[in-house]
Amino acid sequence: MFSYTFQWNQALARLPRMLDGALVTMQIAILSMVIGVVLAIILTMFRRSGNRALSGFATTWVEIARNTPALFQIYMAHFGIASFGIHLSPYMSLLIGITFNNAGYLAENFRGALKAIPDTQTRAGRSLGMSEIGAFRYIILPQMLRISFLPMTNQMVWAILMTSLGVTVGMNTDLYGVTQDLNALTFRTFELFAIAAVIFYLITKAITLSARLIAARLFRY
C-alpha cells in the first residue's frame, strides 16, 4: 500500500544549494560550447584542407564523438588518461568529455552547413585577392555559423543534460551531483529530483526561447 509522505519543505530548504549547482552546470555547458565551437571550426578547416593527415585526424575525431556514448568519452577523460599518469579533477574530466562530444557533433553540423553555401562564393573571394583562409574567414564562416545556429542551440541543450553524467566520475558540485548528495542526506528522493528536473527544464527552455529570439532579430533577412 502507498505510504510515502511527501515533505517538500525539506527539499525546498535545499533549493539554494541546488541553484548553486545549476550555476556550475551552466558554466560547464557554456565553456564546453565555446571551446567546442572553436575546435569544430578547426576540425572543419582540417577536413577542407586537402591534407590527408589533417583530414583523417578530423574525421576520426568526429566519428568517435558521434558513434560512442558520451559517458565513454567522459570516462576516458577521467579514468583512461589516468593510466598514463595524468590525473584530472572530475570538473576537468567532465568539461573535456563534453567539449570533445560537442566539437565532433558541431563539426558535422558545420560540414552540412557548408554544403548549402555555393563554392562560387569562395572563388569570388579568391578573385578579389583573398587567400583561401581569408575567404573562409570573411565569406564562408559567417554564413556557416548562421545556418548552424539552431543546431548549435540543440547542442547547447544536450551539453546541459550531459553534465548529469559527471556524477559517474565523482562530480558533486553541479546540479545533478548536488541533488545526489542531498538525497543521500535527506532521503527525499522524489522531491529533490523533481525539483532538479524542473530546474533542468527551465534552463533548457530558457536557452531555446532565447535562441529563437536571437535568431529572429539577427537573421531576419
Image: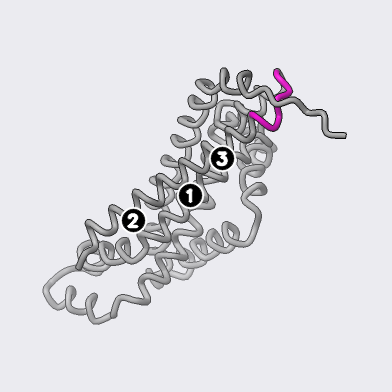
Give the Cα separation between the discs numbered 2 and 1: 13 Å
Q: Which residue is mark 3?
A: 163
Rendered image coloring scheme? one colour
* On screen, residue 127 above or below 110: below
Question: Quick one: SS at disc 3?
Answer: helix
Please, what secondary structure does the residue beneath circle 2 have? helix
Which residue lies under the disc numbered 1? 157
- Dot 1 crowding, Cα within 10 Å, few <14, some 14–19, many 20+: many
Q: Residues within 10 Å of mark 2 (few under 14, many from 20)?
A: some
Q: Is residue 154 magenta?
A: no
Q: CA distance from mark 3 to mark 1?
A: 10 Å
Provide the residue span drawn in magenta: 186-191
Which amino acid, mark 3?
A: Thr
Please name the predominant secondary structure of the magenta segment in the image.
helix
Kind of residue at badge 1: Val
Please identify, in this view, whether the residue under mark 2 or under mark 1 is nearer the observer.
2
Amino acid at the residue labelled 2: Arg
Quadrant of the drawing holding the C terminus: bottom left
Q: Determine which of the numbered discs, if any, sits on residue 212 in the image.
A: 2
* 75 and 204: which is toward the camera: 204
Percent x, y of residue 129: 13, 72
Which residue corresponds to the image point at 62% horizontal and 50% vertical from the top-left? 70
The earlier-in-sequence mark between 2 and 1 is 1
Callout 3: 10 Å neighbours few (<14), some, many (20+)? many
Within the image, what quadrant is residue 132 found in? bottom left
Kindly identify which numbered label has been placed on residue 216.
Answer: none
Residue nearest the viewer, comparing 132 with 206 = 206
First along the sequence among labels 3 and 1: 1
The quadrant in which the N terminus is found is top right
Residue 184 lies, with reference to residue 209, above or below; the image says above
* Disc 2 from disc 3: Cα separation: 23 Å
